[in-house]
Amino acid sequence: MRGWDLVFAAVRVGSFTAPWAWRCYVNERFSEEEDFRKRTELAAELIRSFGLPLESRVMVLVDSTYCCSPVVWAAHQRGFPVVGWVKKNRLLSDGRRA
């Protein structure tokens, strides 16, 4: 539907990749819910809710849309390293652009 996207997470073990979880994003213009959440907030929610498999190492891989404070902070809280590309319009903590 117009204005809807999926925020999607997958698990990769070796060469095997499987879907893990998803959240439905509805553009604020089309949303009838009062608790509108951005795509990045939904992605952070997916990271916070990830159940650790036994004896595993988790790494969060994101594209430039999701390489932002809410997502990186959620991964940091869980102790997961983040690999991603930073958009050139992102501001660094000292005010410079990335």
Image: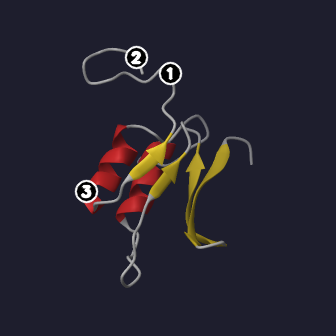
In the picture as drawn, the residue positioned furthest to the right comes out as: 1
* Label 2 to label 1: alpha-carbon separation: 6 Å
Circle 1: element type: loop
From this viewpoint, is residue 36 visible? no
Q: How far across and down, in percent of the image, does residue 94 sit?
A: 25, 18
Q: Dot 3: within a 10 Å radius of its alpha carbon, few (fewer than 14), some, or many (20 or more) residues? A: few
Circle 2: element type: loop
Circle 3: element type: helix
Residue 77, disc: 3
Q: Amino acid at mark 1?
A: Lys
Q: Can you identify the residue that label 1 sits on?
A: 88
Which of the two labelled residues, at mark 2 and mark 1, occupies the earlier sequence position? 1
In the picture as drawn, the residue positioned furthest to the bottom comes out as: 54
Residue at 29%, 15% (x, y): give it. Answer: 95
Residue 95 vs residue 90: left or right?
Answer: left
Q: Are marks 2 and 1 in contact (CB under 8 Å)?
A: yes
Residue 97, disc: 2
Closer to us: 23 or 81: 81
Name above or below for residue 44 compared with residue 10: above
Give the number of marks: 3
Q: Amino acid at mark 3?
A: Gln
Residue at 57%, 49% (x, y): give it. Answer: 25
- Determine the image quadrant of residue 97: top left
Q: Quadrant of the C terminus?
A: top left
Residue at 45%, 56% (x, y): give it. Answer: 60
- Looking at the picture, the colour scheme in use is secondary structure
Q: Amino acid at mark 2?
A: Arg
Closer to us: 98 or 65: 98
From this viewpoint, is residue 40 visible? yes
- Determine the image quadrant of residue 91: top left
Residue at 48%, 20% (x, y): give it. Answer: 89
